């Protein structure tokens, strides 16, 4: 096996949080399942209700950004579109209640993450880069206990190529030695490659459907690595 060209040189790893370091979307999926069951629509199948919810979520992201508040608006908006009965204050509270388990659930670190961060932080510069509501994401970082592995934490409204260029400028990063690590083709991989950075795709079986996208092919000199799990980063860095 040829020697790995990245092991000896210090790199900068921009690392995603939700569904890369800790579980996130599975809790939203459970809330959605409860909502669809509660709605119990007599004409729309669960799959059709979910399709409507996906579209409403896309609209809510534009207005409310990411996070629980936006998710509640999406559930309420879907109810208003599909339900025969009017939305009462009691029904609103019931719908909002589906999100309580998400907010109250302890941060569940994905297997192998802590050990791998410990290994990587001694060899490379790590920056946590996550999108969403500032208070929510800051709280998760604090409760995770992983913050000390990172030289900096960046919580942004959106992860697009403009954001990656801004982060590159802010930290004076060199494109050839900077990698974005994450599970989302739409937010982690493709825009980072478009910004001229390298990327590492770490797939997750429950990646949010709105983050699904075909992986782009890197344009040299940008590079794209794929690992089966987060712990696989130790084989490359």
Image (cartoon, rainbow, N blue to C red):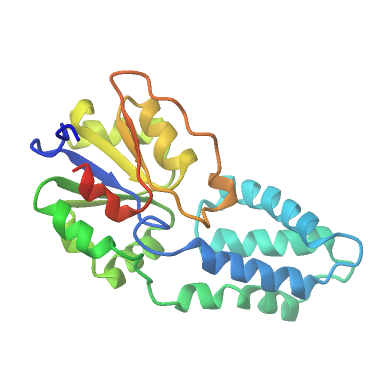
Q: Tell which residue pokes out farthest to the top in this image.
A: 220
How far across and down, in percent of the image, does residue 234 sit?
A: 21, 50
Instruction: Tell me the quarter of the image containing the N terminus.
Output: top left
User: Picture coordinates of residue 8 (x, y %)?
Assistant: 8, 37
Is 229 rendered above or below residue 189? below
Q: Quadrant of residue 5?
A: top left
In which image quadrant can residue 47 be found? bottom right
Q: How many marks?
A: 0
Q: Nearer the viewer, residue 181 or 172?
A: 181
Question: Is 187 positioned to the left or the right of 26 in the image?
Answer: left
Compared to residue 1, the image places residue 36 above or below, namely: below
Q: Residue at x 75, y 73 (%)?
A: 37
* Residue drawn at the location 73% of the way across and 81% of the way down: 90
Residue ranking furthest to the front: 1
Q: Give the answer, above or below, for where 153 lies relative to 3.
A: below
Residue at image location 36% in from the left, 36% down from the top: 163
Q: Position of residue 233 (x, y in %)?
A: 26, 48
- Residue at x-position 48% and y-position 33%: 215
| Pick the front one: 172 or 201 | 201
Query: In what quadrant of the picture does the C terminus appear?
Result: top left
Residue 135: percent from the left, percent from the top?
A: 38, 64
In-image side of 115 versus 109 (left or right): left
From the viewer's perspective, tell me whether residue 102 is left or right of residue 219.
Answer: right
């Amino acid at each position: 096996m040829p020697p790995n060209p990245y092991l000896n040189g210090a790199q900068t790893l921009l690392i995603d949080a939700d569904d890369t370091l800790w579980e996130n979307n599975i809790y939203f999926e459970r809330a959605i399942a409860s909502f669809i069951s509660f709605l119990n629509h007599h004409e729309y199948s669960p799959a059709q209700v979910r399709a409507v919810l996906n579209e409403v979520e896309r609209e809510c992201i534009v207005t409310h950004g990411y996070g629980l508040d936006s998710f509640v608006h999406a559930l309420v908006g879907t109810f208003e579109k599909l339900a025969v009965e009017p939305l009462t204050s009691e029904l609103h509270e019931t719908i909002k209640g589906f999100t309580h388990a998400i907010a109250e659930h302890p941060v569940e670190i994905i297997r192998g993450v802590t050990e791998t961060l410990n290994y990587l932080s001694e060899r490379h510069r790590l920056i946590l880069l996550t999108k969403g509501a500032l208070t929510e994401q800051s709280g998760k970082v604090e409760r995770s206990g992983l913050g000390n592995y990172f030289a900096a934490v960046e919580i942004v409204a959106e992860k697009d190529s403009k954001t990656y260029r801004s982060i590159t400028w802010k930290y004076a990063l060199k494109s050839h030695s900077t990698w974005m690590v994450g599970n989302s083709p739409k937010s982690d991989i493709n825009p980072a490659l478009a910004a001229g950075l390298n990327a590492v795709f770490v797939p997750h079986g429950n990646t949010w459907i709105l983050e699904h996208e075909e992986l782009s092919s890197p344009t040299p000199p940008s590079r794209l690595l794929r690992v089966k799990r987060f712990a696989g980063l130790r084989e490359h860095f």
